[in-house]
Image (spheres, grey):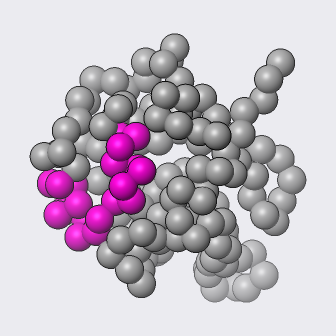
Amino acid sequence: MITEKTFWDKENTWRHQYPINDGIIQKAESILDITFPETFKQLMKEQNGGQLMYPYFMFPDRPGKYELDIEPIHFDQDDVSLISSGELLEEVKLPKDLIVLWWDFHHWLVMDYRFTKENPPIQYIQEDYSTEKMSWIYIKMADTFDDFLKQLFRIVD
């Protein structure tokens, strides 16, 4: 079971330069007009983004494992963060009501706030190559962020 104590890879100090607190989380929620899941907020308060101890997940439609790290919450305009998700989504014509957890421009893992302002499902979105016009296929990965956490795993050498 993943807990706050085992979630972040403490050996890797990637992007720890952005400390976080309740005020920053509330400001981000206000800007994005959403409420982050409670577990997500707790994890971000422990460490504002970075690599995970259980970083791997699998997509339901294709083989292979994918490694997740989570962007920090910060408000600098010149750096990628959870706040700048909207700019990435706009580039590929995806709805702005998504918070990006992982992406490669053809596939996205998101918290889907299109139909709710809190406790969003986790969606996997993939480009649909079967049509001439650019379109997307949505596949639900989990009903909640907590349910998605249960799908994360690590590989022990």
Magenta stretch: residue 144 in it? no
In the picture, measured across the screen, residue 29 lies left or right of residue 41, that is left
For the C terminus, the quadrant is top right
In the picture, measured across the screen, residue 45 lies left or right of residue 121, that is left
* Residue 125 seen from this side: no
Residue that appears at 70% across and 85% down: 132
Nearest the eye: 56 or 108: 56
Quadrant in the picture for residue 135: bottom right
Give x and y (percent) for residue 87. 34, 60
For the N terminus, the quadrant is top right
Nearest the eye: 123 or 144: 144
Query: What's the magenta bit mostly, secondary-structure-wise?
Result: helix
* Residue placed furthest toward the right: 63
In the picture, measured across the screen, residue 112 lies left or right of residue 153, that is left
Decide: is 95 above or below 20: below
Give x and y (percent) for residue 46. 35, 32
Residue that appears at 78% across and 64% down: 60
Quadrant in the picture for residue 61: bottom right
State the count of labels: 0
Decide: is 54 above or below 33: above
In the picture, measured across the screen, residue 130 lies left or right of residue 21, that is right
Give x and y (percent) for residue 44. 35, 40
Residue that appears at 23% across and 36% down: 20
Residue that appears at 36% across and 31% down: 47
Magenta stretch: residue 28 in it? yes
From which residue to which does the magenta span run?
26-44
* Residue 100 seen from this side: yes
